[in-house]
Amino acid sequence: MSLSVISLFPEGSSRPLAPIVALVGPESTGKTTLAQRLADDLDAALVTEFAREYLEQARSLGRDTYTEDDLQTIARTQWANECAARDTRFTIADTDLLVMAIWWRERFGRVPDWIDDILRRADAPKLYLLCRPDLPWEPDPLRESRDDLARLFTLYESALEDIGKPFVVIEGQGSQRFDNARRAVDRWLDALDSDG
C-alpha cells in the first residue's frame, strides 16, 4: 500500500513551527497521565493517543486483533492530529510516530518508509520524554507487553539515539515523576528561548 503524507508545514516554509514535547515509552509507564497534566499545567495543546480510541472502538465491534492496515490508519491519524496542533504556542503529544514505528516493527517486522522519513526530518523543535517502566503495571485489555517492558525501553532509547532527537528519561513515582517531566520541559523551552 502506497501512502503520501503531506506535512501541513512543508520544509522551507517561512511559518515557524511550534515546539512539541512527545511522551514515549513502553506500555503502563504513565505517558497519558503525564501528557494530560503537562498540557494542563503549561496551557499547551494536547494531542491524545489515537490508537487507544481506534482499538477500543474496534473491540466494541467485536474485533480483538489488528492488521497493518489498522496501524496505517492509526499512524496517519496520529500524525495529522500532531500537525493540526502546531498552531499553538507548543504542543504536548501523548505518543507520536516513534511509538508507531516501534510497535510496527515489533508486530510486523518492518517500519513504513514514510514514518521513518518523518521521524528523521527536522521540521519542528521536538523533545522526547522517554518514560521508564518503573511504575506498577496497570492491567488493560489493549496492552500486550507486560513481561517485556525493559527490552522495549531499551528499543526506545536506541531509536531516539538513532534519529538524533533530544530526549530525557523520566522516572519516579507520583508527583516526583511529574516534577521530573516538568523540569525537563522547562529546561528545554528555556534553551529554545535563549537560542531564538
Image (cartoon, helix red, strand yellow):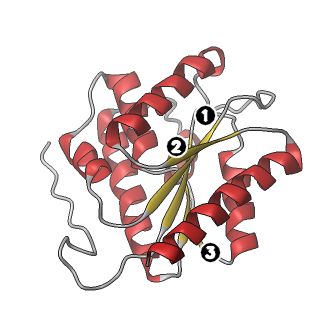
Residue 11, compared with residue 109, is above or below; it is: below
Q: Residue type at mark 2: give it.
A: Leu
Residue 87's place in the image compared with 57, above or below, is: below
Q: Which residue is mark 2?
A: 55
Question: Residue pushed farthest top?
Answer: 147
Q: Residue at x 57, y 59 (%)?
A: 48
Whether pointer 3 and pointer 2 mark residues with C-beta atoms closer than 8 Å, the reply is no
Measured Cα–Cα span from mark 3 to mark 2: 26 Å
Q: Relative to 149, is 1 on the left or the right?
A: left
Give the secondary structure at mark 3.
loop
Residue at the spot 52% in from the left edge and 43% down from the top edge: 55
**Residue 162, quarter of picture:** top left
Q: Which residue is mark 1?
A: 142
Could you tell me residue 61's position as x and y percent? 53, 43
Of callouts 2 and 1, the N-terminal one: 2
**Residue 27, disc:** none
- First of labels 3, 2 by sequence position: 3
Q: Quick one: quadrant of the N terminus?
A: top left
Q: Element at badge 2?
A: helix
Task: Check disc 2: other Cα within 10 Å, few if <14, some if 14-19, many if 20+.
Answer: some
Under mark 3, the amino acid is Ala
Q: Are marks 2 and 1 in contact (CB under 8 Å)?
A: yes
Left or right: residue 185 compared with residue 90: right
The answer to the question of whether label 1 and label 3 lie on touching residues, with beta carbons closer than 8 A, is no
Badge 1 or badge 3: first in the primary sequence? 3
